[in-house]
Amino acid sequence: MAVTGGVSLRATLVSRAATSAEATAADVRALESNVLTTTVDRMASWARKNSLWPAQFGLACCAIEMIAVAQSRFDIARFGSEAFRASPRQADLMIVSGRVSQKMAPVLQHIYEQMLDPKWVIAMGDCASCGGVFNNYALVQGVDKLVPVDVYVAGCPPRPEALLYGLLKLQELIANPSARRRS
């Protein structure tokens, strides 16, 4: 690309065309390389996927692994999720980590209802996903009986890397609107 007096030749070619009939193929290519087009939905999905704010909802041993994800070794901040929120009105992601008792079930539902749309849920660990080794009357056999779950992270407890992988899968779901669940 030639530079004349500090101004690139490509820029001057595009600005010289007075009408669309005068524009050459080179002018059109130069203009296309400087214009970004997208839809509002794709832009919103991109922004949502890169700035998830999780709600603090650690219930049992899986909560220790969820806390480890926010530390410097695993650094969930590189995915835009470093701000764990104590208020459900400021969060758009609920990570349910650990077993959910029958007494805790209404609280979990209430917190989920308080979250603003769009909202997502990750069931972290076997207890949150399917009840785990605790098959009794006191525990909910899977958090998906209470709230819609987007991503399941298996393990007892799952390693922090598994939660980060689940977060990446959730980001893929958010970026692809046709693959999202509707609740």
Image: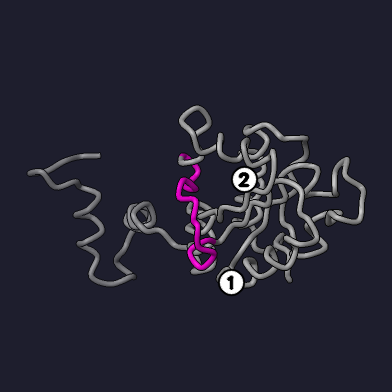
Question: Residue 64: x percent and y percent?
Answer: 62, 37
Please report the bounds of the magenta region as a residue range: 78-91
Question: Residue 108: x percent and y percent?
Answer: 68, 63
Which callout, 1 or 2, points at the residue further toward the start of the chain? 1
Q: Is residue 74 located in the magenta-colored stretch of the structure?
A: no
The chief SS type of the magenta part is loop
Which residue in the protein does label 2 denote? 167
Q: Residue at x 56, y 52 (%)?
A: 56
Residues at marks 1 and 2, CA–CA distance in whole angstroms: 22 Å
Between 162 and 65, the one nearer to me in the picture: 65
Q: Is residue 34 left or right of residue 2?
A: right
Q: Residue at x 55, y 71 (%)?
A: 116
Q: Residue at x 59, y 71 (%)?
A: 114
What amino acid does circle 2 point to? Leu
Q: Is residue 84 located in the magenta-colored stretch of the structure?
A: yes
**Residue 114: numbered disc:** 1
Disc 1 packing (10 Å; few <14; some 14–19; many ≥20): few
Quarter of the image containing the C terminus? Answer: bottom right
Is 157 placed above or below 20 here? Answer: above
Q: Residue at x 55, y 61 (%)?
A: 92
